[in-house]
Image (cartoon, rainbow, N blue to C red):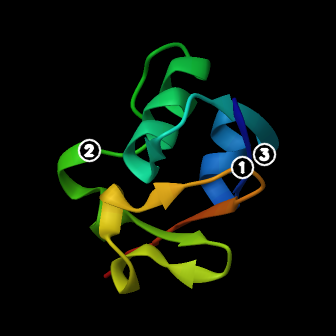
């Protein structure tokens, strides 16, 4: 199993109560699978709308925004750090 550290910043961390956690993920795994595992930990409720995931949150893996890699298909490996930062909108 790969151990992945996840930091959920801002409202996502507060709402879920998960904050900083470490997940055991069966490799090979992608960022999308980590997001799904987090949702399962939160009672199966989607943390972020899957259809608008990249519009609702900035997701970094080891300090690099995933859109600069392979998006939600970016491979996650043992020891990686995933940071999820919600994007706030207002008018």
Question: Nearer the N terminus, badge 1 or badge 3?
Answer: 3
The answer to whether residue 70 is above or below residue 49 is below
Q: Image check: 81 left or right of 12?
A: right
Q: Image check: 43 left or right of 17?
A: left
Q: Give the camera-side residue of 54 and 78.
A: 78
- Residue 87: image location, x then y, percent: 46, 72
Cβ atoms at labels 2 and 3 below 8 Å apart: no
**Residue depicted at x 51% and y 19%:** 40
Q: Does residue 90 appear in this view? A: no
Question: Which residue is tagged 3?
Answer: 19
Question: Nearer the N terminus, badge 1 or badge 2?
Answer: 2
**Crowd rating for badge 3 (residues with CA inside 10 Å; few <14, some 14–19, many 20+):** some
Secondary structure category for the residue under label 1: loop
Q: Image check: 29 left or right of 1?
A: left
| Distance from Cα at disc 1 to Cα at disc 2 | 24 Å
Q: Residue 78 carries which label?
A: 1
Secondary structure category for the residue under label 2: helix
| Distance from Cα at disc 1 to Cα at disc 3 | 20 Å
The quadrant in which residue 19 appears is: top right
Q: Residue 40 carries which label?
A: none
Q: Image check: 87 left or right of 78?
A: left
Question: Nearer the N terminus, badge 2 or badge 3?
Answer: 3
Secondary structure category for the residue under label 3: loop
| Distance from Cα at disc 2 to Cα at disc 3 | 20 Å
Mark nearest the camera among 1 and 2 is 1
The answer to whether residue 86 is above or below residue 1 is below
**Crowd rating for badge 2 (residues with CA inside 10 Å; few <14, some 14–19, many 20+):** few
Question: Which residue is tagged 2?
Answer: 50
């Amino acid at each position: 199993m790969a151990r992945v550290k996840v930091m959920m910043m801002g409202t996502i961390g507060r709402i879920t109560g998960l904050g900083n956690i470490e997940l055991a993920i069966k490799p090979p795994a992608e960022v999308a699978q980590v997001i799904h595992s987090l949702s399962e930990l939160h009672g199966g409720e989607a943390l972020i709308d899957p259809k608008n995931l990249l519009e609702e949150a900035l997701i970094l893996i080891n300090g690099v925004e995933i859109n600069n890699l392979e998006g939600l298909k970016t491979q996650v490996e043992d020891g990686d750090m995933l940071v999820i930062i919600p994007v706030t909108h207002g008018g």
